[in-house]
Image (spheres, rainbow, N blue to C red):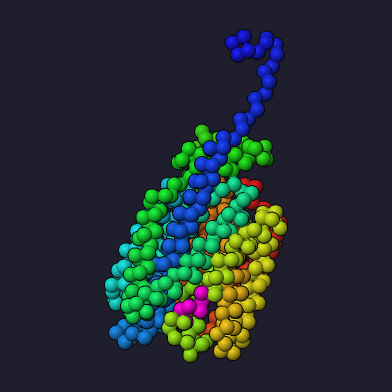
Amino acid sequence: MPDGTRPGVAPAPLRPPAADPASVRRSLRWRWQIFAVTWIAYAGFYFVRQAFSVAKLGILDDPAVNHTLTSHTLGLIDAVYLAAYAVGQFAWGSWADRFGPRVVVIGGMAGAVVASAVIGLSTSLVVFGVAMAVQGLAQSTGWAPLCKNVTSFVPVRERGRILGLWCTNYAFGGLAAPPFLGWWAYSVFDSWHAAFLAGSATLAVVLALFVVFQRNEPADVGLPRPDAQGATAESGGAAPDPDEAPLTSREIYREILRNRMVLTLSAAYFLLKPARYALLLWGPVIVSERLPEVGKLEATLIPVAFGVAGVLAPMTVGWISDRLFSSRRVPPCVLSLGLLTVMLAAFVPLTATGSTWTMVGVLAVIGFGLYAADALIAGVAAVDSGGTAGAGTAIGFVNGCGSVGAILGGLLPGFLSTTALFYGFAAAAALAGVVMLPHWNRTAVTA
């Protein structure tokens, strides 16, 4: 016989070829290259996003603008920004599923750079409002598309740890951007305008790196999708049929809206996000109010404790969810929300002492609990619930609902006392934990 077999004798089953070491090295190189460039990209967004928070101290003390840009007005501008951010979240995740993350993120970064530069060169209330709306739409291109991008190179079994490590990007951005922008604004140029211009220049550099080093998915560089390999080799499942017609954006959204876990995550994130954005956007002002003896630069630096803990939290909670809870995301999330509830309720009495170090410690613990829950809800749990085809849409929907809540985080500090604010945040965090609790044993859709 031409193939070397004898009539009537079935050929021996073919063994899968051993993995080519060169292909394995190439796959790992691309995984970590995408991890690095998307991590830098999302951290880079914060160097524009945090500019307004840093500039507020200077704006409120600037007699040329503080008669129009009052505390209430700044709160309303934050609300405009966050409303645009929420609208964008609902749209861009779906666009990333349809067109790929690259085009969405590049367009968003370019828009953020331009909007920040325009604000930095203006003192007009109208320009502030319009440019911050554009900034909100531009900033919202980051999270869902980039989450989809990095997880497309990562198998489910490693997703908690790797995405937990990746989620340190926004904590790092919130940590590094304020002192960097504050240094340019108040030490180098002594002008709040410099915060916006320095942020714009920083993100422009990040945009150039993203254009050069990013790719949408493994297929773009000739590699198989990790989940397809895992499904075949580990669970006995089949890889998706490449000839099957992909779902339309409307069909994906319909499936997402029927997903109880996605809806639960969305509700919990709506309750959690106001506290995070109040501290991000008003942190220096809150510190200055509680510790009136500190200067502007110190008030900008003290909330760094919130960001430092936020860098550690996603890595820790991602490892715990994979290792101790077998890739279940809800248990560590509920525990984190419990810690957060206690510390938010204790913020006012503990900081009444006027101690700088007490303020640092309280903000650090709040940061750990908040970022741990945030990273699980908005990142790995949303990806797990959306599956491969709808990951971007699920992340965008969850984050869109959270961003609606974040509007309150930007708006309320301009109108409410710190006491009312933090007790309200504590109640919201407790309710988020209650909402998540029934899903304690939930595992990933794609696991």
Residue 128 seen:
no
Residues in magenta? 299-304
Image coords of residue 332 (percent x, y): 67, 63
In the image, taking residue 265 as reference, residue 132 lies left or right, namely left
Q: In the image, is residue 113 above or below residue 409? A: above
In the image, taking residue 148 as reference, residue 325 lies left or right, namely right
Image coords of residue 360 (percent x, y): 56, 79
Image coords of residue 416 (percent x, y): 50, 83
- Residue at x 51% of width, y 79% of height: 302
Q: In the image, is residue 340 above or below residue 61? A: above
**Along the line of sight, the residue nearer the viewer: 376 or 312:** 312
Q: How many marks?
A: 0
Location of residue 62 (image quadrant): bottom left
Q: In the image, is residue 105 above or below residue 236? A: below
Location of residue 177 (image quadrant): bottom left
Q: Quadrant of the N terminus?
A: top right
**Along the line of sight, the residue nearer the viewer: 250 or 295:** 295
- Residue at x 63% of width, y 73% of height: 340
- Residue at x 50% of width, y 66% of height: 172
Q: Specify whether residue 181 is painted magenta.
A: no
Residue 353 seen:
yes
Image coords of residue 202 (percent x, y): 37, 64
- Residue at x 38% of width, y 84% of height: 60
Please identify the dominant SS of the magenta region. Answer: helix
